[in-house]
Structure formats: C-alpha cells, structure tokens
Amino acid sequence: MTQPTELQTIAGGGLLDRRVFLKKGITFSVAALASESLLAETDPAQLPWMKTPGEPLSNYGQPSAHERKTIRWTMGNSMADGNGVSWTPLHDLEGTITPNGLHFERHHNGVPQIDPAQHQLLIHGAVKKPLVFTMEALLRYPMSSKLCFIECGGNSNAGWRDVPIQTAAGYVHGMSSCSEWTGIPLKILLNEARVKGRAKWLIAEGADASAMNVSIPLEKAMDDCILAVYQNGERIRPENGYPLRLVAPGWEGVLNVKWLHRLHLSNKPAMSRNETSKYTELLPSGKARQFTFVMDAKSLITHPSYGQQLNKTGYYQISGLAWSGRGKIVKVEVSADGGKTWAVAELQDPVLSKCFTRFRIPWHWNGQTAILKSRATDETGYVQPERDALIAARGKHGYFHYNAIVSWQISNHGEITHVYA
C-alpha cells in the first residue's frame, strides 16, 4: 500500500519531510489506546498522590526523585586532587538551554569557595588608568545578556581513537553546554581603563588555586566578551565561576576563565601552559596549530543515540543539537543510510548566533539495520566534516577541536552503537 504523499520518504532509510508533523499527524501506537482502557488504568482511586496532600513549599526547587539518573558524569585525576571534568548529559535533555546544575565543568585545582565581599577584579598592564573593582562596584554597571554555548576545546576527543567509544552521547560530547549569561560588557571596563595603543592581548587569570591564565586577542575582548555574574537568571554557581566569569562567545572553553580576578593588557600573549603544551597540536605537515580559538560547526543526534532502545518499528523523531562558534547554524542535514543520501532537518526557533540550535526530522524505521548521521552548516558556509576528512587534514596527533560527523548504528533489534561510517 502506498503511503499518503505527505508521508513518502525524501531520503534513504525512511527519512520523511521535516514538516510532516505539521502537515499531517502520524498515529503512534500509544495514541491508539481506547479511552475507556486508559481511564481505567488511571482511576484516581488507585493513585495515592490524588488522595493525600502533596509535599510542602521549598526554598529552592529540586528535580523529581524519578529523574535522579539525569546527572553529570564526573571524572577526576588520581594524580591531582581537584583536577577533573564533568559532562552534560545531552542525551537526557531537550530544548537548547542547559540547566545550571548540569552545565559541564572543567577544574584544574578544585572549586574555590570565594567570598564575594573579598573578591576583586584588577585591570592593569598596558592601560593609562589601572582599575580595581569590588563585586559591589561591578554590580552597579549596566549589564546585558547573551545566549551562547561554551565548549571545552577537548570535547569529543575520544573521536581521535582508532576504535569508537561506546558510551552515552553526552558523556563523549557533553563538555559543551548552553546558557543565558548576564553581566557587564567587557569593553565598557576596558574603555574606562583607557587601553594603550600597543596593547594587542588580554591575559585573563582566575582566582583558583592553579591561577589558571590564558591570552585573548584584544579585538575579541572588545567585541562580544562579557564579565558574567548571572547564569540562566541566577548568580553563577561556584563550579561555573562564582562570583565572576569571563564569557567569550563561540571560542574554546579554556578562554572563558572562571573566578576571574585579573586582566592584564599586553603587546604579546603570555604563552602559558594552556596555549603551549596544551591547545597546540602537530599537523601532518610538521607545523603546529596554535591559538585555534573558534569552535567550528558541529552537530550531534541525541535521540536516538547510544544506550537508547527502539522497541518496535514505526515512526520516530530524530532530534539533536548543532552549534558553531562562527555564527548561526543555517542547515542541518540528516542521513539514515550512512551518508548515501541526506534530508534537511527542521531547525527549532530561535536560531541564534553561537548558540545551541535544536534540529528535528521525522523518520520511519522499518526494523532493518540503519546508520544515522547529522551534518551542520553555519552561516559562513563551513560544513561539518566526515571523520576521515578531519583526520586527513589534522593527522593522528589530535586531541582538541574534534568536530567530525557522529554516526549511530541501529541494529535490527533496535540496539544503538557508535560506529565510524
């Protein structure tokens, strides 16, 4: 029997037109249950929470006890206390905004417990007017908000391995999160300090025990960087930089210095550990990549993905995230046949520059083996590369800025694994 025109596939593997849910509803098995049967199963007399008063008010809301599996996965360094990382569970989330308690973390020497009344920000070096600010003084300045992602330069680095890693999507690619950051535009304070003409770099330093510091081109600092005080409407939490964090939209996470306490203007970079021995990579030509600030376009299918299960054939919605440090995502294509054919997915509004963009596309799974892929294109025309193309360009010594297309294989039993395809 031929499907109605609206439901005919537009690419191999059963991908449907991205607008099919708007044009014509698809009947899913759960929606076909008889209303009498459904009501019988949900008889209030059988539901204890409809017979007794609920919990009292609380001062700060917490997730449901039934959602405790939605957590960050953490990994520390046995050789150095306080050095470690936690991943955002992207596979368990929807939309584009990461809850504060699930934003990824990267610490070099633990989380400092800073008293904001004692915290100060120093701006000095190649300036005509060195300045020191208390947090109280900073809070008097005009603020603005930016929705943007922050992604660690080492995110997804397991992709450089010869054998595909088998773990949940967020626990490989979840060193990337998206928030609304609110704070003072950095250029306001730099203009007040009156930067000298010879200054080309801004060296930012955190107040953690490792005094983590990195160099940022002055042009970026004067463009869209902010000194963030709030995250998603509440004061930044300690693990994400309380009381003050530098946010450099679209650039690698290490530049978004947490617990910010010093900005030094200079005519040259600091050449610190995180821009020499780290974040510098040998290329096949023998040259090295250094100061690779911008995070290139990337996408990831989060539903379905590793660890999830397709229990029956029929219609599913493929969903995922795309982002680019170069600007807006303009297109995400999805393949269900390992890249032989592609279909354009729907981009969920709002589509913002340097921000997570949610994409969706309907799919009919016929119970046979399939390989799902997504491919992002940003407004500069940059297209997310296949893994073999990325390795050909960057070699086998890579660790940072891995942004190759991710492939999920669906077995004929509905099991999902990570493959290189």
Image (cartoon, helix red, strand yellow):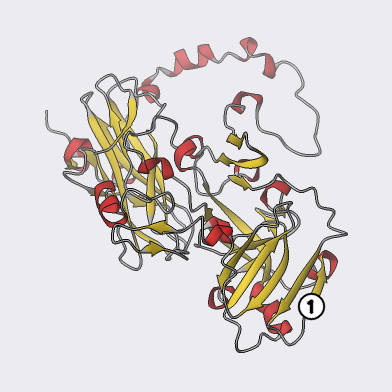
Quarter of the rendering occupied by the N terminus = top left
Relative to 10, is 1 above or below? above
Quarter-wise, where is residue 222 in the image? bottom right
The crowd level at tag 1 (other Cα within 10 Å; few <14, some 14-19, many 20+) is some
Tell me: residue 14, above or below residue 28: below
Q: Position of residue 302 (x, y in %)?
A: 41, 38
- Residue found at the very far left of the displayed protein: 1
Look at 66% across and 85% down and name the residue there.
Answer: 195
225 or 204, which lies in front? 204
**Residue marked by disc 1:** 131
Quarter of the image for the C terminus: give it: top left
- Residue furthest to the front in view is 286
The residue tagged with tag 1: helix, strand or loop?
Answer: strand
- Residue drawn at (60%, 28%) of the image: 67
Between 103 and 268, the residue placed more toward the observer is 268
How many discs mark residues in the rendered view? 1
Where is residue 260 shown, x and y percent of the image? Answer: 71, 61
Residue 93: x and y, percent?
51, 38
Give the residue drawn at x 83%, y 70%.
Answer: 137
Give the amino acid type for the residue marked by disc 1 in the picture.
Leu
* Relative depth, front residue between 139 and 205: 205
Q: Quadrant of residue 408?
A: top left
Residue lying at 73% horizontally and 83% vertically, measured from the top left = 192
Residue 330 can be seen in this image:
yes
In the image, residue 73 above or below residue 289 = above
Looking at this view, is 290 or 120 the one in front? 290
Residue 224 in view in this figure: no
Could you tell me residue 227's position as x and y percent?
68, 66
